[in-house]
Image (cartoon, rainbow, N blue to C red):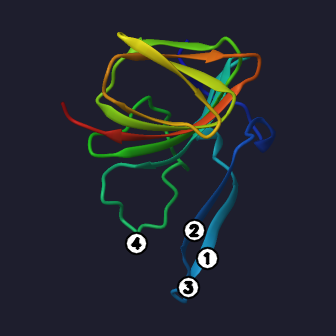
Amino acid sequence: MDLKQNNLQGASSQPFRRVVTGVNQSGQSTIMSDGPVPDAASLIAPGQASGSDLWMEKSVPANLIDHSDPMANYSTQSWPPPGGVIARVMKWEPGYSYPMHRSDTVDILFIISGQLELLLEDGSAVLTSGDCVVQRGTNHAWRVVGEEPCTFTAVLLSAVS
């Protein structure tokens, strides 16, 4: 099932906290925002999956002078733009699966809790809390295993093949 943009109103539907730093007018480091990701960046498949795109850069290297929040007027997308990056956090419920697919990205996933099975054309691996996988533009699928949800973060880097 595809994740849809979450059009629910209010922070109560957004469980993930995001702290963003920057530089104030005096040139000192400071917290620019602390709270939930804007609703426009929320992802949801009711009863199956929820999450947020935490940050997106349209190109790398990032512009440190631009203090705008790229998530404020964000339109949810599956993959980063060419030359760009998306940071994402997801919580998938037990039994949830994402079908076999391939993208022109390098995806770095960090499992926070639960278990997630990475399915490849030749083999699979079950990832648990503390594990990391670097998925390099290959055909793959995902499946939550066990009785608890799987929470993970992912950084999706645009790539070429």
Which one is nearer the viewer's eye here, 152 or 131?
131
Q: Residue at x 75, y 40 (%)?
A: 15
Q: Which residue is mark 1?
A: 30
Tell me, yes or no, whether the two marked residues, 2 and 3, touch with CB atoms within 8 Å: no
Which one is nearer the viewer's eye here, 59 or 123?
123
Q: Is residue 93 visible?
A: yes
Element assignment for label 4: loop
Q: Which residue is mark 3?
A: 28
- Residue 59, given in percent of the width and then of the height, sits at 31, 51
Q: Earlier in the sequence, mark 4 or mark 3?
A: 3
- Residue 129, given in percent of the width and then of the height, sits at 65, 36
Q: CA distance from mark 1 to mark 4?
A: 14 Å
Q: CA distance from mark 1 to mark 3?
A: 6 Å
* Numbered circle sitting on residue 65: 4
Q: Earlier in the sequence, mark 2 or mark 3?
A: 2
Q: Earlier in the sequence, mark 4 or mark 2?
A: 2
Tell me, yes or no, whether the two marked residues, 1 and 4, touch with CB atoms within 8 Å: no
Name above or below for residue 48 compared with residue 156: above
Q: Earlier in the sequence, mark 2 or mark 1?
A: 2
- What residue type is disc 3 on? Gln
Name above or below for residue 76 compared with residue 103: below
- What residue type is disc 2 on? Thr
The residue mark sitting in front, 1 or 4, is: 1
Q: CA distance from mark 2 to mark 1?
A: 6 Å
